[in-house]
Image (cartoon, rainbow, N blue to C red):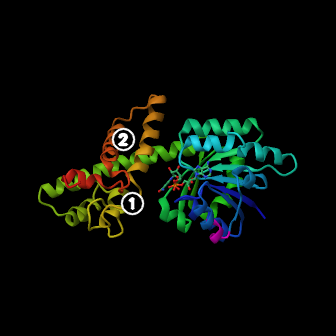
Amino acid sequence: MTRIAFIGLGNMGSGMCANLCRAGFEVCAYDLVPEALERAVQAGAQTAGRAAEAAAGADVVISMLPAGEHVLDLYFGAGGVAAAVAAQSETRSEALLIDCSTIAVAQAREAIERAAAMGLTMLDAPVSGGVAAAAVGGLTFMVGGSTDGFARAQPVLAPMAGNIFHAGEAGNGQAAKIANNMLLGISMIATCEAFNLAESLGLDAQTFFDISSKASGQCWSMTTYCPAPGPVPTAPSNQDYQPGFSVAMMLKDLQLATAAAAANDAPVDFGRAAEQAYAALAADGHDQRDFSVPMLALKGVL
Ligand code: NAD
């Protein structure tokens, strides 16, 4: 029986942890927040008083934390998870570390290198899909790291996943994630501008949707997540732009993308423009609204 330590039971992690319990894995969960631990217990997990304690007996450690500094501290800080796992690996088969948080490519590569220096295999495995996909086990995993580590991770990721991709070497999962989300941020703002332009020229949203969703402008931001209310009933635009995926989350991913682009001399003029647009929304207090809310800003009703 594969034993899993799951660290970070927030909006995403709680659903992921529950799906691992449902699939029959023995899960020991840890979070700083007692209510999060209580939810994990209800889902069928055991809990530990410290992260290192949860990790000590585990075959696989999965983390789902807010940002890179939390991840580096969890694994390599004082009383960290990596040392606890390394201490066990002398007496047990090698444990696998899988970080699913969205963090900087450089931080993911640093973590995987530091783990390797301790004799441990670590993967970056960020996800796309959001809270609803986490709850139903429909996430898309983008995995960076060794082929052997990826092969060992697949059965563990499967109960949480709709798709699992090996993106290549260490950090490549994060690279795929931020490039994808930069494209999403740009396409969402472009979709908002197109609907606003069409409406200002006399087309209603449904008519423009019917045409453009069958023409060359169609994209996920339009057909699955339409920022104009009406055409896609499940989209947050029909629920007063409640997230979904928040402005704050999109801004975080765009900041990671533009920082990585600057460090690697990759021009991202539109990515930077999208970052500035979301930063302005966040600064105006709209950070917890859905990332399709630029639609209201363009209409001047935000
Ligand atoms: P969240 O803030 O809801 O959850 C994070 C959890 O980590 C919290 O419960 C917090 O208490 C816990 N935590 C923080 N530091 C900890 C530590 N040292 N030890 C143990 N627990 C700790 O965040 P979330 O929405 O679940 O997102 C998690 C990650 O997934 C982020 O990196 C985010 O960018 C990424 N992500 C989120 C979404 C989304 O739609 N929410 C989608 C894709 C990716």
> Residue pushed farthest right?
91
Please give the name of the residue rendered at 31% of the width and 43% of the height, measured from the top-left corner.
280
Picture quadrant where residue 27 is located: bottom right
- Amino acid carrying mark 2 in the image: Glu
The answer to whether 62 appears left or right of 287 in the picture is right
| Disc nearer the start of the sequence (2/1) | 1
Please give the name of the residue rendered at 62% of the width and 66% of the height, measured from the top-left corner.
38
Q: Looking at the image, which is closer to me, 105 or 276? A: 276
Q: For mark 2, does the 10 Å Cα neighbourhood hold few (<14), some (14 to 19), or many (20 or more) residues?
A: many
Quadrant showing the N terminus: bottom right
The answer to whether 106 appears left or right of 118 in the picture is left
User: Magenta residues?
Assistant: 40-44
Task: Residue 203 in the image: state x and y as whole percent.
Answer: 15, 61
| Alpha-carbon span between mark 2 and mark 1 | 18 Å
**Predominant secondary structure in magenta?**
helix
Mark 1 — residue?
Answer: 243
- In the image, is the residue at mark 1 within 8 Å of ligand 1 by its beta carbon? yes
Is-magenta flag for residue 153?
A: no
Please give the name of the residue rendered at 32% of the width and 49% of the height, measured from the top-left corner.
285
Task: Residue 195 in the image: state x and y as whole percent.
Answer: 22, 56
> Residue pushed farthest left?
202
Whether residue 169 can be seen here? no
